[in-house]
Image (cartoon, rainbow, N blue to C red):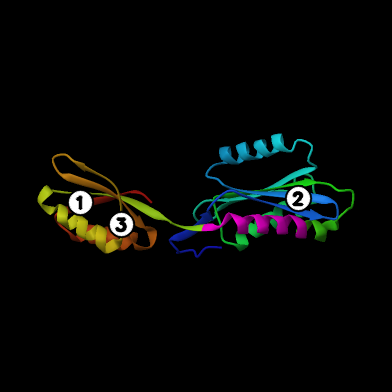
């Protein structure tokens, strides 16, 4: 899905939906960007209100910059015939922080396990394609401080390492809060340590 040491990951760009009709059954696929299990619960409840008479509400989600949290739910369909194909569709496009729900209305014809896998996975893949993807960076947050006359050194390091300034504070000295891509975090930390005029510490990473 994502390289173990990569500092980039991908999220969906927008909500999306797709409708698949297969031998009388209808599969309504929905894609949502999510950041918490509370959000997932709210989205699922919303769809259950929208389609209270649907046969199944199957879903899968992936969260975390490394895609470390994952779950799939068949909601009464035969084991691994719905949630797992939806999850595979998410993993195959390398996305995280995403929920995909496929709502099914049974049309009277049994599709069999292969048919269910194809329908749930296909509907999910089509909705994910419509959602697009956007690159994000795994970042580490540092606080760097210096006397006012050495503020330029902070600017120089920010430029060199492509850091993102999150905020600055001027008290008896100047302090910056910056976000650095995880891949260069150690080098950045070393560069700060090598400057006797600067002090810095990792606050989130």
Q: Main secondary structure of the magenta part?
A: helix
Q: Tag 3 or tag 1, which sits nearer the N-term?
A: 3
Of 32 and 194, nearer the camera is: 32
Kindly report which numbered mark, 3 or 2, lies closer to the viewer in this rendering: 2
Q: Quadrant of residue 113?
A: bottom right
- Magenta part of the protein: which range? 118-133
Q: Circle 2 — which element?
A: strand
Q: Position of residue 128 (x, y in %)?
A: 62, 56
Q: Which mark is residue 27?
A: 2
Residue 193 in view: no
Tell me the quadrant of the picture where the N terminus can be found.
Answer: bottom right
Task: Tell me the element at label 3.
Answer: loop
Alpha carbon distance from label 3 to label 2:
44 Å
Mark 3 or mark 2: name the one nearer the start of the chain: 2
Q: Kindly state the secondary structure of the residue where label 1 is placed.
A: strand
Apparent side of residue 145 relative to residue 128 in the rendered image (left or right): left
Q: Residue 193's x, y, as percent?
A: 22, 58
Q: Mark 1 — residue?
A: 199
Location of mark 3 (residue): 163
Q: Earlier in the sequence, mark 2 or mark 1?
A: 2
């Amino acid at each position: 899905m994502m390289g173990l040491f990569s500092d980039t990951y991908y999220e969906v760009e927008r909500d999306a939906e797709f409708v698949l009709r297969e031998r009388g059954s209808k599969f309504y696929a929905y894609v949502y960007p999510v950041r918490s299990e509370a959000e997932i619960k709210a989205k699922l409840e919303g769809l259950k209100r929208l389609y209270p008479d649907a046969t199944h509400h199957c879903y899968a989600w992936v969260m975390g910059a490394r895609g470390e949290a994952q779950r799939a739910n068949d909601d009464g369909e035969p084991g691994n015939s719905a949630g797992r194909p939806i999850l595979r569709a998410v993993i195959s496009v390398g996305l995280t922080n995403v929920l995909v729900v496929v709502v099914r209305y049974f049309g009277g014809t049994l599709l069999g396990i292969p048919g269910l896998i194809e329908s749930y996975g296909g509907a999910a893949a089509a909705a994910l394609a419509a959602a697009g993807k956007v690159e994000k960076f795994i970042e580490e947050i540092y606080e760097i401080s210096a006397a006012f006359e050495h503020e330029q050194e902070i600017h120089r390091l920010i430029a060199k390492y492509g850091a993102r300034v999150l905020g600055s504070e001027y008290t008896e000295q100047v302090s910056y809060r910056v976000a650095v891509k995880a891949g260069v975090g150690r080098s950045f930390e070393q560069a700060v340590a090598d400057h006797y005029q600067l002090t810095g510490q990792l606050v989130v990473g």
